[in-house]
């Protein structure tokens, strides 16, 4: 067995936790309190990376899978409210995310999962042509099969002894799942826009235009959906209407700006204005509900980034 490197991280802030998830570009927005940190153990081997995590607070997330890796996610504990791309989470589910795809999720406090990140080249060697078929999959848990059960069993064993991850065997099992998976494909003919597509288009519009508080009309035009369909899409994916999602997004951006600000040279109102906020009192109240303190307290407490 080849040597492996293991790191363990405890994070009380969403952005610190996101950096621990191996192989993925993850954006977390904290949506609830909680005294427990998020915890992550990352085991890195030449064949694969295993990230074992638990959520200490609730958050919503958006993850980008690089083109050079594929990702399997095994849900091991699923409190009510957790979702990936609108799919309600349950313990025992195994998901696959193809290279170059993205997924969004609602992460409930107490959610536990392990993510296996495998280089695309390794999977292609073992399951020729898997990329083309994987890209057509709906975002659902993989259908039960002997191959899915075998991979799940290997991952559950690895959770107990992460540094003993049998990298080569896990890659072979992962490729076997892709080669035989019988997840039903959904016809795209005459199908209305999926919730995941609407949500991703809306978020990409906000990022492209650097708009922290987009209007429903803007989001409808950007996504190609009606107002009611837009709202339903965000509820399907995040269990939140779009206005609430972008409120959390704004609060997260405000906290990031406060963390970088110098308390003697910058003010809360100045930072809020730079983010396009005009209702200072209302946003301050929402910030306190999310983070347990007013923006001014965060500005005083956090040191400037000299």
Image (cartoon, grey):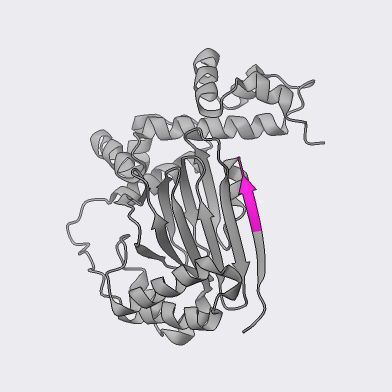
The kind of secondary structure the magenta stretch mainly shows is strand
- Tell me: 41 left or right of 229: right
Q: Is residue 221 above or below residue 96?
A: above
Q: Locate residue 285, reporting x and y percent.
A: 51, 18
Q: Is residue 219 above or below residue 289?
A: below
Q: Does residue 11 show up magenta in the picture? A: yes
Asked whether 153 or 49 is in front, the reply is 153
Q: Locate residue 257, reporting x and y percent.
A: 65, 32
For the view shown, which residue lies furthest in the left direction? 190
Give the residue at x 26% y 50%.
193
Quadrant into which the C terminus falls? top right
Q: Locate residue 108, reporting x and y percent.
A: 42, 43
- Tell me: 125 left or right of 19: left
Give the residue at x 58% y 43%.
37
Q: Is residue 267 above or below residue 78?
A: above
Give the residue at x 38% y 82%.
176
Give the residue at x 41% y 85%.
128
For the view shown, which residue lies furthest in the front direction? 160
For the view shown, which residue lies furthest in the right direction? 306
* Res 112 → quadrant: bottom left
Number of labels in the image equals 0
Can I make out residue 277 in this image?
A: no
Q: Locate residue 21, reporting x and y percent.
A: 57, 57
Can I make out residue 131 in this image?
A: yes
Asked whether 34 or 299 is in front, the reply is 34
- Tell me: 140 left or right of 207: left
Q: Is residue 48 above or below residue 301?
A: below
* Res 242 → quadrant: top left
Q: Does residue 191 show up magenta in the picture? A: no
Asked whether 221 or 80 is in front, the reply is 80
Task: Please give the range of residues in magenta.
Answer: 8-12
Quadrant into which the N terminus falls? bottom right
């Amino acid at each position: 067995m080849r040597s492996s490197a293991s790191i363990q991280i405890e994070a009380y802030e969403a952005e610190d936790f996101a950096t621990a998830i191996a192989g993925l570009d993850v954006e977390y927005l904290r949506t609830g309190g909680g005294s427990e940190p998020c915890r992550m153990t990352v085991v890195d081997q030449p064949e694969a990376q295993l990230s074992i995590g638990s959520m200490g607070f609730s958050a919503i997330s958006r993850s980008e899978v690089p083109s050079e890796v594929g990702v399997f996610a095994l849900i091991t504990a699923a409190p009510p409210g957790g979702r990936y791309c609108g799919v309600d989470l349950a313990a025992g589910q195994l998901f696959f995310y193809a290279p170059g795809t993205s997924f969004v999720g609602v992460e409930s406090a107490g959610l536990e999962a392990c993510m296996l990140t495998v280089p695309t080249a390794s999977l292609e060697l073992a399951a020729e042509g898997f990329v083309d078929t994987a890209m057509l999959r709906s975002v659902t848990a993989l259908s039960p099969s002997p191959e899915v059960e075998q991979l799940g069993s290997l991952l559950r064993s690895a959770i107990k002894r992460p540094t003993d991850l049998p990298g080569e065997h896990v890659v072979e099992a992962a490729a076997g799942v892709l080669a035989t998976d019988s997840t039903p494909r959904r016809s795209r003919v005459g199908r209305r826009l999926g919730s995941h597509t609407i949500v991703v288009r809306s978020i990409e519009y906000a990022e492209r235009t650097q708009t922290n508080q987009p209007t429903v009309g803007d989001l409808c035009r950007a996504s190609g959906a009606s107002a009611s369909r837009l709202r339903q899409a965000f509820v399907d994916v995040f269990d939140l209407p779009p206005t609430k999602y972008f409120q959390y997004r704004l609060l997260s951006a405000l906290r990031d700006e406060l963390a970088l600000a110098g308390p003697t040279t910058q003010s809360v109102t100045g930072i809020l204005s730079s983010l396009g906020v005009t209702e200072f009192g209302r946003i301050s109240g929402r910030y306190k509900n999310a983070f347990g303190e007013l923006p001014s307290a965060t500005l005083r407490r956090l040191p400037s980034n000299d």
